Amino acid sequence: MAGSTFGTIFKITTWGESHGKALGVVIDGCPAGLDLCEDDIQVYLNRRKPGQSNISTPRNEDDAVEILSGVFEGRTTGTPISLIVRNTSQISGDYSDIASCYRPGHADYTYDAKYGFRDYRGGGRSSGRETVGRVAAGAIACKILKSIGITVCAYTRSIGSIEIDMDRFDRNSILNTPTAMPDPVANEAAIHYLEMARKALNSVGGCMECIVEGLPAGIGDPVFDKLDANLAKAVMSIGAVKAVEIGDGCKVSSRYGSENNDSFRMNGNEVTKATNHAGGILGGISDGSTMVVRAHVKPTPSIMLTQHTINQSGTDIDINIQGRHDPIIVPRAVVVMECMTAVTVLDAMLVNMSARLDSVAAFYRR
């Protein structure tokens, strides 16, 4: 299977399946000298793991990470870092009834069409559980970025028709609400909305947003490796994400240029903007203002309502999906978006170190 590696210098390769023995990631290109222990990574994995509230799957995994290589005496060595998270609560029997049919909204049919064979136990590589490796790698990227004054923060922007009020934005609520909403009022409304969907044997979609603060101007490469292009690929590669926006996103298509352009201003010796419709990126390169990325997530496709599908023999059948599933994907995917954003930004910054001769000279000049 191709396509399991992402990045140019800070490069990650995830591996493992939903119901295999373990999942993990190999990270190449992490600089030597970073203080790193398993607790640094575990705090991010704990945000992603299942079974933490009644709006997530009851599958009970500790998601305990082990560092297998690349760290010695508490610091990274510059060699590949290998991380593993063992599966301990898989119940593969839940999926025996759907081994020969294609679940609506899932990758069952497309995997069969591509490979002629598929791991039907929880979707294998197409399962959301694959994101364990992304989060583990992203935790390291976040720590590196934080050490140079750059913070990455993702949260739930909306669940179904319930959207947060930015005037009530409370960053602490992201970690303290089951919805990962930074608005306690919207959180309560969303929980009620989700409970109604659950009683109707249905599921709900939503929107995630990620902001990056402290990113300097000049990061990203024109043409094919634009910062926003790579961010779109990184975030779109998260299962169930169906659309990605930068800044004001789709809203800009209905505006006049005079409404959408961000006017530049000087604040002392610092270049600033009067507005940030562009979301911190111009021409594929960061402009020094807050970077804003948004992702729209489809409803969980595994629902208990009767659905129409076909089996591998080409017979029309009805299906009721059993097992343990999230009624909404968004709250647990928020940290995945945060981590994929961090990996993309860090990789772009490392690539950027060779963009100017004066930067190279300053680094190597004695």
Image (spheres, rainbow, N blue to C red):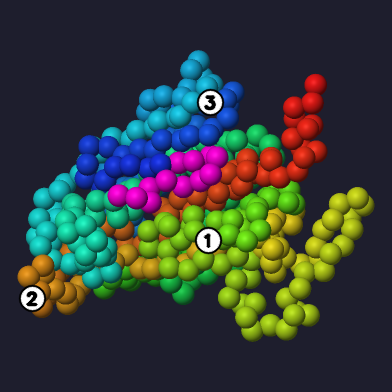
SS state under label 1: helix
Disc 3/disc 1 C-alpha distance (Å):
28 Å
Label 3 vs 1, first from the N-terminus: 3
Q: Main secondary structure of the magenta part?
A: loop
Residue 208 lies in the magenta-colored region: no
Q: Name the mark on residue 91.
A: none
Can you give x and y, in whole percent of width and height, for residue 177 in the image?
A: 47, 53
Whether residue 50 appears in this view of the structure is yes
Please report the residue visible at 84 percent of the width from the left and 56 percent of the height from the top: 271
Amino acid tagged 2: Thr
Q: Observer-nearest residue: 140 or 198?
A: 140
Please report the residue visible at 16 percent of the width from the left and 46 percent of the height from the top: 91
Label 2 vs 1, first from the N-terminus: 1
Please report the residue visible at 55 percent of the width from the left and 40 percent of the height from the top: 9
- Residue on which disc 3 sits: 78
Disc 2/disc 3 C-alpha distance (Å):
54 Å
- Residue on which disc 1 sits: 232
Q: Observer-nearest residue: 81 or 142?
A: 81
Can you give x and y, in whole percent of width and height, for residue 278 in the image?
A: 69, 66
Left or right of 301, for residue 345: right
Amino acid tagged 3: Gly
Q: Which residues are magenta?
A: 1-12
| Residue lying farthest to the top in this orientation | 73
Label 2 vs 3, first from the N-terminus: 3
- Residue on which disc 2 sits: 315
Whether residue 179 appears in this view of the structure is no
Q: Quadrant of residue 182?
A: bottom right
